[in-house]
Image (cartoon, rainbow, N blue to C red):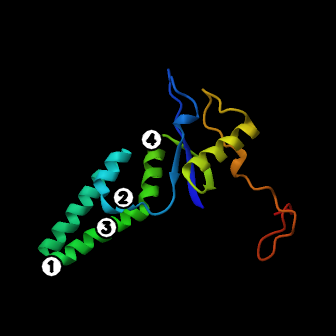
Amino acid sequence: MKIYTVHQPPARRRQTRRGPERFRFVRDGFHFWAFLLPPLWMLRRGLVLVLLGYVVLAAALNAGLYFAGVAPFARVLANLALGFLVGLEASSLRRWTLRRRGWTELGVIAAPDQEAAERRFFDQWTAREGAPPPSSGPQQPPVFRRPPAEEPVIGLFPEPGAAR
């Protein structure tokens, strides 16, 4: 099962498309293409500010290693390590960019692939709340809420429903 975060775009004036096709599903986990070709992956995803930070960091890393007299093979390994870090954090970089642009994170959903995640999210959304309103602000769908536990909690946690 893969984990996806669901993001809703900000509402805009005179918006023509307000339906669910504008939602973004960001898969959590390692992104191979972000590891292999970080700048191209960032451009494709529209992560311009992230790309700028990556270029500055890569240039500083390479310049520092060059002036320190490090062997070329070690510099290649350092660049691969930087690419590996980008591949690991690719989902977080996308979520940060969406949040910076005003998108709202609606929650998390688990599914085998993105199509199943979309189907599951929108099925539960329409079943509980009806269709997403076209002009209202972001809403929290109840898809991601867990019902309170019927059994007592074991451990150092307080009893559910008890006074604090």
Which numbered tag is attached to residue 95?
Answer: none
Q: Amino acid at mark 1?
A: Ala
Q: Secondary structure at mark 4?
A: loop
Q: Nearer the viewer, mark 3 or mark 2?
A: 2
Q: Nearer the viewer, mark 2 or mark 1?
A: 2
| Precedes in sequence: disc 2 or disc 1 | 2
Residue topped by disc 3: 82
State how far apart marks 4 and 1 are (Cα). 41 Å
Q: Residue furthest top?
A: 14
| Precedes in sequence: disc 2 or disc 4 | 2
Which numbered tag is attached to residue 71?
Answer: 1
Q: Amino acid at mark 3?
A: Leu
Residue topped by disc 4: 101
Q: Position of residue 73 (x, y in %)?
A: 19, 77
State how far apart marks 3 and 2 are (Cα). 11 Å
State how far apart marks 2 and 1 are (Cα). 25 Å
- Contact between marks 2 and 4 (CB within 8 A): the answer is no
State how far apart marks 3 and 1 are (Cα). 17 Å
- Characterize the local packing of mark 2: few (<14), some (14-19) or many (20 or more) Cα atoms within 10 angstroms: many
Q: Secondary structure at mark 3?
A: helix
State how far apart marks 4 and 3 are (Cα). 25 Å
